[in-house]
Amino acid sequence: MAPASPADPQFPRSWRWIPPLCLRGDWQMAIDDWLLDQLLLKPDQGVVRLYTWSRPTLSLGHHQRSIAPAWRRAASLGRVELVRRPSGGGAVLHGGSLTYALLWPDAPRQRQRAYGLVSAWLAQALAHLGLALTPGQEAATESSANCFASSTAADLVGADGLKRVGSAQLWRRRKLLQHGSVLIDPPVDLWRELLGSPPAAPAAAQAISPAVLEQQLRLAAAKRLGGGPWLLEPLASREWAEIDRRRHRFRLT
């Protein structure tokens, strides 16, 4: 896939880059949800941000209603936090990973096309770190309880067929939020306890740090996501206050 042109009408005229944040899960999900609503106010500007989680967190998809006993038990012991994502899909264990969020005001209406354009950005960044990934080949079906148990064209897998990047979408008033998790060095024991199988850690995980991955993702974004102006703009005090008012929507107790 050729690099995107700044004049490509599929991409915003400019992008807002929010500096990486390490926060609790309810904050992270509320930020993504709030930013999606803000696309109506700035229809020509997209948003990209990268973030990590301040403690191990299991996020459930928006339509995922069943909470496994092992998840409740781990949460009651304070070993993991439970939150609900605004997007769909199965459960994702966040820890030893980097999460991305891309908010796109005028994304292609074909979901697979949107997934493909974002995947090209992620794959290019990871290729520079020695990790060659391609889209998954499995057909989309009813969500598995474990998001990383299957891999569709929305995801990225290694040469061994194991999933290294899982992504999900939320469309609201024709605006797109796509966010996903990039495995770096996931906690194997906790992953096995909560999801029943070990994670597929990248072969090069030992050499990848979140800071280096963040840098490569930012460099690749300028080439793959339109090349327009990239504006470094942290969240303002007013924005934090508005986000705080919707955190409760994403907490699971």
Image: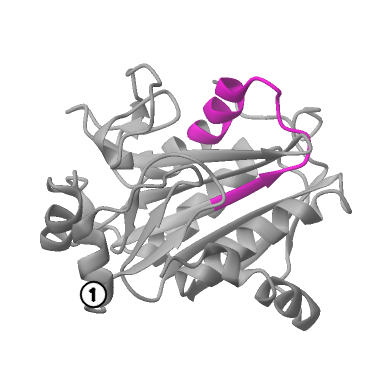
Residue depicted at x 16% and y 62%? 190
**Going by the image, does 42 lie left or right of 223?**
right
Tell me which corner region of the image, top left, top right, bottom left or bottom right, holds residue 238: bottom right
Residue depicted at x 81% and y 30%? 7
Q: Return the x and y of residue 199 as percentages of the image width and height.
A: 18, 47
Q: Return the x and y of residue 52 as percentages of the image width and height.
A: 43, 67
Tell me which corner region of the image, top left, top right, bottom left or bottom right, holds residue 38: bottom right
Q: Return the x and y of residue 160 as percentages of the image width and height.
A: 17, 28
Instruction: Please state the extent of the stretch shown in magenta in the rendering.
Output: 101-119
* Quadrant for the C terminus in the image: bottom left
Mark 1, other Cα within 10 Å: few <14 / some 14–19 / many ≥20: few
Q: Is residue 186 visible?
A: no
Q: Return the x and y of residue 119 as percentages of the image width and height.
A: 49, 33
Q: How many marks?
A: 1
* Quadrant for the N terminus in the image: top right
Q: Is residue 54 above or below residue 216?
A: below
Residue depicted at x 32% and y 64%? 209
**Going by the image, does 193 lie left or right of 119?**
left
